[in-house]
């Protein structure tokens, strides 16, 4: 089972869904200014995708033929905290974004099958300077130099979020349905209850834009993400071997995929000939197929 054709087909379908999500966000985004979220044009190399987002609000994928990777990285850092979306559109994008992220994560795992990396040797620890040893360690130190903040890079997580087994949701009465108890103080001022949430309420979508940009960068560089996963896997094996010799426990997660149904998916397994109900979306089929490819790559690694 090579899986290259299946990975390519699911990758193209995910890019199509991502372009749709970007178009949805651009249509409903409240723009306080031009260019709220610029991080490359969606769908580089895809036919008919360069016309998405004529307003220029969401541009994630780099244009076809763009050679300046530094310029693309600079554009990806222009994330405005003032980006807002209506509540109904925000939730609609989120319902599709979560399974798309899980499917991209599984495609990365499947693409990393057969990749062998060699970890560099561990760097020796630097000895402490003389000023931090002996009696000089108790002397007052001078003013510390503030280090320049490093720019935050957007990257898709290679591990599924852990399942909260013992999480009990809190039962709270919404603010618009709270009981009106004023007590015996007749001079208390009456404060009306807040209105119930409306589907058109503006919601801060800056975090949503960052997740879209991270998913865009992962799909735009699938071989590089596969190398990244291979390095994580090599570090995990090295940590497990070292902790088994010492008799301790490893801090690395044993599997990048959590048990049960994939996050955000509605299909438990992939069956290409099964009749699917109406509630199953295209992203659910992609996620189920990508999950099967990832499980096969983890269970039967290519050691040739």
Image: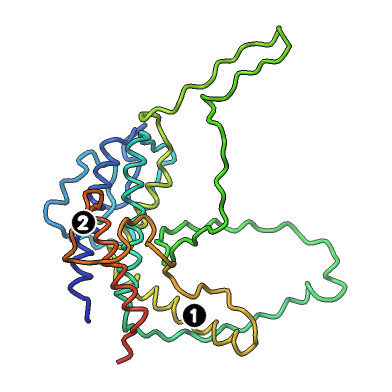
Q: Residues within 10 Å of mark 1 (few under 14, many from 20)?
A: some
Residue 225 visible within the image: yes
Q: Position of residue 81 (x, y in %)?
A: 44, 40
At horizontal 23% and vertical 50% (from top left) the residue drawn is 19
Q: Position of residue 109 (x, y in %)?
A: 34, 73
Q: Provide the secondary structure element on which disc 2 rests.
A: loop
Up-down relation of residue 228 to residue 169 (above or below): below
At horizontal 43% and vertical 86% (from top left) the residue drawn is 118
* Image colouring: rainbow
Based on the displayed image, in which of its 4 quarters is residue 275 positioned?
A: bottom left
Between disc 2 and disc 1, whose residue precedes?
1
Q: Position of residue 301 (x, y in %)?
A: 34, 84
Report the quarter where the C terminus lies: bottom left
Q: Relative to 244, is 42 on the left or the right?
A: left
Q: Residues within 10 Å of mark 2 (few under 14, many from 20)?
A: few
Do labels 2 and 1 touch, CB within 8 Å? no
- Which of labels 2 and 1 is toward the front? 2
Q: Relative to 172, is 34 on the left or the right?
A: left
Q: Nearer the viewer, residue 51 or 285?
A: 285
Up-down relation of residue 182 to residue 166 (above or below): above
Q: Relative to 300, is 64 on the left or the right?
A: left
Q: CA distance from mark 2 to mark 1?
A: 40 Å
What residue is shown with label 1? 235
Up-down relation of residue 274 to residue 129 (above or below): above
What residue is shown with label 2? 276
């Amino acid at each position: 089972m090579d899986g290259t054709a299946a990975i390519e087909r699911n990758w193209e379908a995910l890019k199509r869904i991502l372009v749709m999500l970007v178009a949805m966000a651009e249509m409903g985004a409240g723009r306080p200014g031009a260019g709220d979220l610029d991080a490359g044009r969606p769908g580089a190399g895809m036919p008919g995708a360069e016309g998405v987002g004529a307003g220029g609000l969401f541009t994630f994928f780099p244009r076809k033929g763009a050679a300046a990777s530094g310029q693309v990285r600079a554009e990806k850092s222009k994330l405005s905290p003032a980006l807002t979306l209506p509540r109904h559109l925000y939730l609609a994008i989120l319902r599709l974004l979560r399974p798309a992220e899980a499917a991209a994560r599984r495609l990365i795992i499947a693409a990393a099958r057969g990749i062998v990396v060699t970890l560099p040797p561990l760097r020796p620890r630097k000895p402490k300077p003389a000023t931090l040893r002996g009696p000089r360690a108790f002397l007052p130190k001078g003013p510390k130099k503030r280090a320049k903040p490093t720019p935050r890079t957007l990257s898709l997580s290679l591990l599924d979020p852990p399942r909260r087994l013992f999480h009990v949701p809190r039962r709270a009465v919404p603010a618009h349905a709270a009981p009106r108890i004023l007590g015996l103080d007749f001079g208390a001022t009456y404060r009306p209850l807040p209105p119930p949430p409306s589907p058109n309420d503006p919601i801060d979508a800056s975090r949503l834009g960052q997740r879209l940009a991270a998913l865009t960068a992962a799909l735009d560089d699938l071989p590089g993400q596969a190398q990244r996963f291979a390095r994580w896997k090599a570090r995990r094996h090295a940590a497990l071997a070292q902790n088994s010799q010492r008799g301790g426990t490893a801090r690395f997660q044993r599997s990048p995929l959590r048990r049960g149904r994939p996050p955000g998916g509605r299909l438990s397994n992939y069956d290409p000939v099964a009749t699917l109900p109406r509630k199953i979306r295209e992203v659910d089929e992609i996620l189920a197929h990508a999950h099967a490819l990832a499980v096969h790559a983890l269970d039967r690694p290519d050691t040739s």
